[in-house]
Amino acid sequence: MTRDERLTALLALPNDWDSYGSPPPSPKAADQLRRVLDRAEERVGARWAEPFISPGCGMLQAEWEGEDNWLVVEATGEGVAVAGPDDERPAAEDEAVEAIVAWFGAAA
């Protein structure tokens, strides 16, 4: 399944998709995550590995996991957050791209 196919499938989730009343991811969150991932993939090049993309309460999360390292980027449509083993913070889209690029450098 391609990234776009995965995002489209997640956007089609119904309300209460998790039985805890969560709304489906917003189209704004999907657009935001798509922008961040597209830009990061362009910078990372051949080392790129597609993240696991999962839904949250109206948002989307991209996750990478290495042997001793991991990175999570959350997109809400209103903002982005980046989390790793030593860090969790709100971030601008540019900062999220830089965090992904740095993770791939560290994971190489």
Image: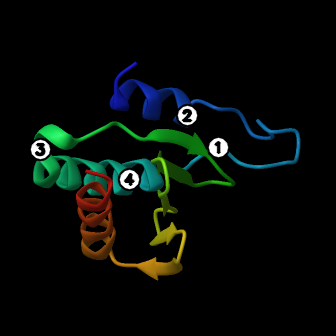
Q: Quadrant of the N terminus?
A: top left
Which residue corresponds to mark 4? 33
Residue 45 image label? 3
Q: Residue at x 19, y 42 (%)?
A: 47
State which tag comes first along the sequence, 1 or 2. 2
How far apart are labels 3 and 2 at the CA level?
A: 26 Å
Q: Amino acid at mark 4?
A: Leu
Q: For the residue labelled by badge 4, is the local secondary structure a helix, a strand or a loop?
A: helix
Q: For the residue labelled by badge 1, is the local secondary structure a helix, a strand or a loop?
A: loop
Q: Total marks drawn?
A: 4
Q: Amino acid at mark 3?
A: Gly
Q: Could you tell me residue 36's position as x and y percent?
A: 29, 57
Task: State the scheme by which the image is colored.
Answer: rainbow
Q: Is residue 31 left or right of residue 80?
A: left
Which residue corresponds to mark 2? 10
Residue 24 image label? 1
Q: Amino acid at mark 1?
A: Pro
Q: Could you tell me residue 102's position as x and y percent?
A: 26, 66
Question: Dots 3 and 1: beta carbons under 8 Å?
Answer: no
Within 10 Å of disc 2 (Cα), the crowding (few <14, some 14-19, many 20+) is many
How far apart are labels 4 and 1 at the CA level?
A: 15 Å
Q: For the residue labelled by badge 3, is the local secondary structure a helix, a strand or a loop?
A: helix
Which callout, 4 or 1, points to the residue nearer the camera?
4
State which tag comes first along the sequence, 3 or 2. 2
Question: Dots 4 and 1: beta carbons under 8 Å?
Answer: no
Within 10 Å of disc 4 (Cα), the crowding (few <14, some 14-19, many 20+) is many
